[in-house]
Image (spheres, helix red, strand yellow):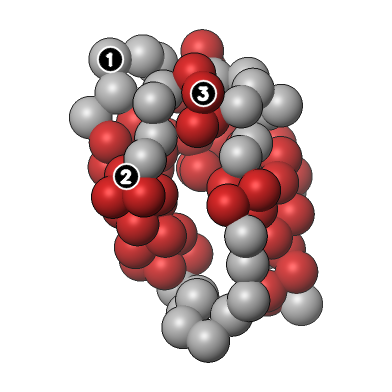
Amino acid sequence: MPQPDELKQQIKQMIVERLFLDVEPDQIGDDENLMEAYNIDSVLLFEIVVGLEEVFEVSLEGVDFSVETFATVNNIADFIVALRG
């Protein structure tokens, strides 16, 4: 399991790549609301979910989560850590 800062950096990199954002991963704040800052809708949220499954080799099928889970990089990192136990 990557260290917390490394995990967050991997998440940011994946988000930038999957959503074709015109920002550097380092420009995304850990507590920045991703939905508001990058206009993430349900289709783009699905791209993030698929990206997490591929990058972190986790399955989100059958996992109960809310949109809030993906609101910030910190929330996503906590979610990944919890999934991996």
Q: Residue 67 carries which label?
A: none
> How far apart are labels 3 and 1 at the CA level?
15 Å
Helix, strand or loop under label 2: helix
Residue situated in front as seen by the camera: 62 or 7: 62
Question: Hey, which residue is sitting farthest left in the picture?
Answer: 20
Please tell me which residue is depicted at 28% across the width and 50% down the height of the picture: 43
Q: Quadrant of residue 21?
A: top left
**Residue 77 in view in this figure:** no
Locate residue 83 relative to residue 43 in the image: left or right: right
**Is residue 67 something that shows in the picture?**
yes
Residue 66 at x, y percent in the picture: 62, 60
Q: Mark 3 points at which residue?
A: 36
Q: Residue at x 53, y 86 (%)?
A: 62
Q: Is residue 13 left or right of residue 74?
A: left
Whichever of callouts 1 and 2 sits on the residue coming sooner in the sequence is 1
Q: Which amino acid type is marked by label 1?
A: Asp
Quarter of the image for residue 22 reads: top left
* Position above or below: 69 against 27: below
- The residue most toward the bottom is 62
| Amino acid bearing label 2 | Leu
